[in-house]
Image (tube, coloured by chain):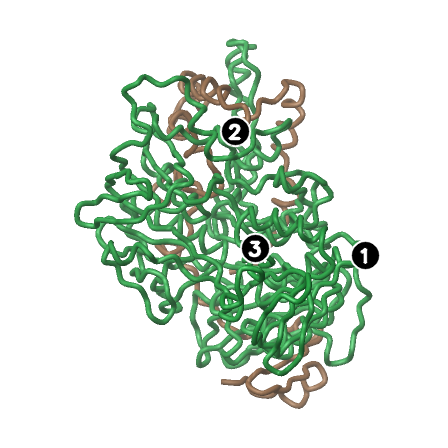
Chain colours: A green, B brown
Amino acid sequence: RQKSNLLQRWNVPIKLQMSRQVASSGVPGGRGDSSVFVLIVGLSTLGAGAYVSRKVASDDILYSLGLGHLPCCVCSKLSNLSPAAPGARPEVPSHVPFLLIGGGTAAFAAARSIRARDPGARVLIVSEDPALPYMRPPLSKELWFSDDPNVTETLRFKQWNGKERSIYFQPPSFYVPVRDLPFVENGGVAVLCGKKVVHMDVRGNIVKLSDGTQISYDKCLIATGGSPRNLPAIERAGKDVQQRLTLFRKIEDFKSLEKISREVKSITIIGGGFLGSELACALGRRARTRGLEVIQLFPENGNMGKVLPEYLSNWTTEKVRREGVNVMPNAVVKSVSVCGNRLMIKLKDGRKVETDHIVAAVGLEPNVELAKSAGLEVDSDFGGFRVNAELQARSNIWVAGDAACFYDIKLGRRRVEHHDHAVVSGRLAGENMTGAAKPYWHQSMFWSDLGPNVGYEAIGLVDSSLPTVGVFAKATAKDTPKSATEQSGTGIRSESETEAEASEVHISPSFSPMPQVPKQGEDYGKGVIFYLRDKVVVGIVLWNIFNRMPIARKIIKDGEEHDDLNEVAKLFNIHEE
Amino acid sequence: MTPPVSAFSELLLVVSYMVGKDRIIFATKEDHETPSSAELVADDPDDPYEEQGLILPNGDINWNCPCLGGMASGPCGEQFKSAFSCFHYSTEEIKGSDCVDQFRAMQECMQKYPDLYPQEDENEEKEKSSKDLEATPMEASAAKEEKGSS
């Protein structure tokens, strides 16, 4: 090939117009895909094949296009990947410039951000988890709806557009072996897994691991996340009960629950929030096909009772029931005991529930053990490490993700336990660790699907104790999560644009949708719900309408007082077909 | 804190009532077709609190742009940045013609990591390149919405 011919094909149409909407997290698929089409053509004169990358907001799309089998993303295998190293290299470097404590979504987002901004940066992730960094949302959603019988091994799921992806952010080849991190030419990200940081010396800038290893650092991120809470009633109950309990958070919990769901006759989920309701719906689907009894019980009046206004929470509860779940609201657990070969749950109001296995989804306790040795402040209202608006706890120490109680310059001090927040805050921490000094201003979003007919996205302070104004239109069959993805043609309904490989892909279960039963005045098919503090909108839920996150984000960012929220609702075009 | 009840003439188009502290409004399509009187703050192009796209206001490349995914941060990140920077700042008549070495280095690096950077077949690549140059439905709708918002 002629050189000039090749170069003519180097076409980099970049959507500069997208700069406003690009990279805002969580704008669903067709809308803000922030496409950058980069055509990079290798030199055929070298005899090398041409490489074309059509980047749709993520190299992870490349990864998901990757054909053939990928090696299992088990962290411990990484140490075997480097060839027999010279005897001189220690297994773990004694010093790293960037140390990230925790190997989840926030840490991965930070690692990526640091690498993007600091050429040749050397980043070490130290994770208790034996797995490489992965995303959690599919563990309670997509993975349950996969048709692949090996899904518990592959941890891959198919998107609507037929393309598969893994829950892992990157395959093992992305990472540098830990012992090579100080030496590899252009730096990289290494993951030291199955190790816990147990002590932090903030003045000496050194941490100590569970096995006694010491690592010094220049900059450190704490992204330790949280651990699932348990009910005191269950903790008291003894080993026999504990053996029949799942505290759901990690890959191994998914694997174990998936197996159990095939073996037992009855599973009870305690907790009515996001995780509990999603798992209930996921298991409810199996209830149909396998005769599994699925019970969900919680103290509130309805599903998502702390998030959605009561009328909507009630409506959602009915939907969850239609997914095959026996929902028991207003249920407070008094005691749990083993009865024969089954469990007996006694509620405070006297009701009894007999079941085989319990899944507790009753909240997350932020992992702040390091606060003591590090001398870091723990927030008494929200829990978590207290950090400033730039996510900084002290010089050289930042905190991101579930464990960070931070100052949001728009909405005040808060702690957020959602996936997109982990991405956004991790990314920001990475930027600030490389000198950006930016405050947290970019609102993260979250979403949930409860079956094929109820889906919503939300942003800001979505707290049902706030006064709300909900504006609804009548739903048509076109407004479900399933149809939203089909229409946009990408299958990616909700994508965090900040880190698309850290993004969530939505699949609603593919069984036939429930017939819509519209009741005049009570059909909350689609609409927008505003959460108010004084007259200012501080939170928005997009109810069964999609691709509108940018306008929602804008309204919260403006922080204006609005007298008539129906007028604001008009901006969302809720009637659009 | 609650919005005023709609004027009588609009009562037919909007139904609004309270359930405790929560207001519920059912609005018809006709009602929402009238222009909104809600005021939005004008966008400031120099707003430091807006996400930046691929190119920063000062002309530099934003390597942290989510649109790049992991290209700038992976094992071939440096080679990618080098090649793309060269291309971006190239003032040659054929843009990037002075960057052949950098692209070659990037290519060589990427070949070492086939699961991160899958290699395409040449024939497939021809097809794909022509598709990529066309606006996709996604882009078209995104562009449409851009005009609509702000």
Q: Do labels 2 and 3 share a chain?
A: yes
What residue type is disc 1 on?
Ser
Q: Where is residue A132 in the image (x, y as percent from the top left)?
A: 48, 39
Left/right placement of residue A373 relative to residue A501 reads left
Q: Residue A256 carries which label?
A: none
**Chain assignment, label 1:** A
Tell me if mark 2 has few (under 14), some (14-19) or many (20+) residues whose alpha carbon lies within 10 angstroms of its own. many
Tell me if mark 3 has few (under 14), some (14-19) or many (20+) residues whose alpha carbon lies within 10 angstroms of its own. few
Badge 2 vs badge 3, beta-carbon distance below 8 Å: no
- Considering depth in this image, is A340 or A462 the residue closer to the camera? A340
The image quadrant where one finds the N terminus of chain A is top right
Q: Position of residue A452 (x, y in %)?
A: 72, 59
- Is disc 3 placed on a helix, strand or loop? helix
The Cα–Cα distance between marks 1 and 2, rounded to whole angstroms, is: 37 Å
The residue shown at (61%, 39%) is: A165
- Is disc 2 placed on a helix, strand or loop? loop
Q: Position of residue A20 (x, y in %)?
A: 47, 52
What residue type is disc 2 on?
Leu
- Considering depth in this image, is A492 or B93 the residue closer to the camera? A492
Left/right placement of residue A352 relative to residue B62 reads right
Q: Name the residue under label 1.
A: A512
**Chain assignment, label 2:** B
Q: Where is residue A118 in the image (x, y as percent from the top left)?
A: 32, 36
Q: Which mark is residue B116?
A: 2
The Cα–Cα distance between marks 2 and 3, rounded to whole angstroms, is: 36 Å
Q: Name the residue under label 3.
A: B147
The Cα–Cα distance between marks 1 and 3, rounded to whole angstroms, is: 36 Å
Regarding residue A214, the answer to whether it shows in the image is yes
Does A26 sit above or below residue A48? below
- Considering depth in this image, is A242 or B71 the residue closer to the camera? A242
Regarding residue B84, the answer to whether it shows in the image is no
